[in-house]
Amino acid sequence: MNVYAILGLIPLAVWISLAFFRGRFWSVRRHLLPSMPLAADLSKTAIAVIIPARNEAASIGLTVTSLLAQRYPGPVHIFVVDDESTDRTADFARQAAASVNAGDRLTVLQAGPRPAGWTGKMWAVSQGIAQATIDSPAYLLLTDADIDHHPDNLTQLTSWATRGRYALTSLMVKLHCHTPVERLLIPAFVYFFFMLYPPAWIRRARSRTAGAAGGCMLIAPAALSAAGGIAAIRGEIIDDCALARAVKRSGGSVWLGLTAQTHSHRIYESFGEVERMISRTAFNQLRHSPLLLAGTVLGLVVTYLLPLALLLSLDRTAAALGAASWLLMSATYLPMVRFYELPALWALTLPAAAVFYLAATVHSAIKHWTGRGGEWKGRAQDASR
């Protein structure tokens, strides 16, 4: 066996491992939030919704309206925390509530001066929780300002959390996927996220893997307190997964799943917009380690690009191994592609998406080293200087 054939065995071994020994992270059907009957009596199970919002005038109205339209049998109160917005975020939140005659179910708070060591989002969330817990709700829903919640979302999420006795239950909502850029990059983003945080491993009590999707997280106040509260993750850039780790360390159970019914209405029209989303957190995910960065780059090249390079080789064995790796890669990507209602052949584009995410990861490191790490909406919150 020549060197090309030996090289061909490496990515094939990687894809066999990913396909069969990583909790079937790629199986969309296994991770969907189950539709189920109402759990017991939720009429007295109050939920406080916390929405940190910074310059979200374009989206906050739809999010607030969708939450006020929930077919949830218990009390629901919404707390929008305006995080130093320079647009009319607060006004549009109030207008949305007034338009459905539900102004009494919305409280808009202005975030106070941010203490040292806190990210803006976590400081806003902490202030919302402090106000919300005065009335002792049974659950807190932490959600982003760009989420269109299906009318049954709170009922299904709370029923699932109650029946499974989950301390933290979160949903990866269906992201907007209509522009050409989104079609190439958004299904891949969710696929890579589940590869890093396999839901089956997250649910396993003995597994150290912990993850959550910050767009929609339901947590009991007692579980949050046991995990150290929001203060325990006050400086975290990847705050959702940090919260999941804190909950799991404190003995709470965690569930992460998918939903096709609740959507994000944030639109990404350019590669730059997606790149900024990824570069904000990628190097933080690697713990700011140049060694881990180098390993990640090498791993992405071997896993996603080497199979294509082998296909172009003149060695038949190497080309066959490269084709086998690419087909197995595409087969695991196919369920996510179909979830986003794209043609099956779109599964073959995963290597192109991987190149983009590789570049964004390297750029994330560069931004960190030049004092712009964690840059988002005018704030750099993960800088090295």
Image (cartoon, rainbow, N blue to C red):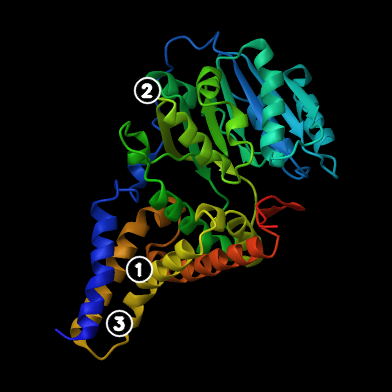
In the picture, the quarter occupied by the N terminus is bottom left
Where, quadrant-wise, is the C terminus in this rendering? bottom right
Say what secondary structure mark 1 lies in: helix
Which three-letter amino acid code belongs to the residue tagged 1?
A: Thr
Disc number at residue 70?
none
* Residue on which disc 3 sits: 311
Tell whether 222 sits left or right of 7.
right
Which element is circle 2 on?
Answer: helix
Within 10 Å of the Cα at label 2, are there few (<14), some (14-19), or many (20+) other Cα atoms?
A: few
Q: For residue 322, which quarter of the picture?
A: bottom left
User: Which comes before the other along the chain, label 2 or label 3?
Assistant: 2
- Circle 3 sits in a helix, a strand or a loop, which is it? helix
Q: Is residue 271 above or below residue 2?
A: above
Task: Say how many tags the image has.
Answer: 3
Q: Position of residue 59 (x, y in %)?
A: 72, 42
Q: First in sequence, mark 3 or 1: give its number.
A: 1
Mark 3: amino acid:
Leu
Residue 347 on image: x %, y %: 39, 64
- Residue named by callout 2: 164
In the rendered image of this protein, does residue 209 appear above or below residue 41? below
Q: Residue 303 shows which numbered tag?
A: 1
Q: Are marks 2 and 3 in contact (CB under 8 Å)?
A: no
Asked whether 38 or 240 is in front, the reply is 240
Q: Residue at x 44, y 55 (%)?
A: 192
- Image depth: mark 2 or mark 1 in front: 1
Which residue is more in the foreground, 207 or 91?
207
Crowd tier of the residue under label 1, counting other residues whose Cα lies within 10 Å: few below 14, some 14–19, many 20 or above: many
Neighbours of disc 3 within 10 Å: few (<14), some (14-19), many (20+): many
Q: Quadrant of the rendered structure where residue 81 is?
A: top right
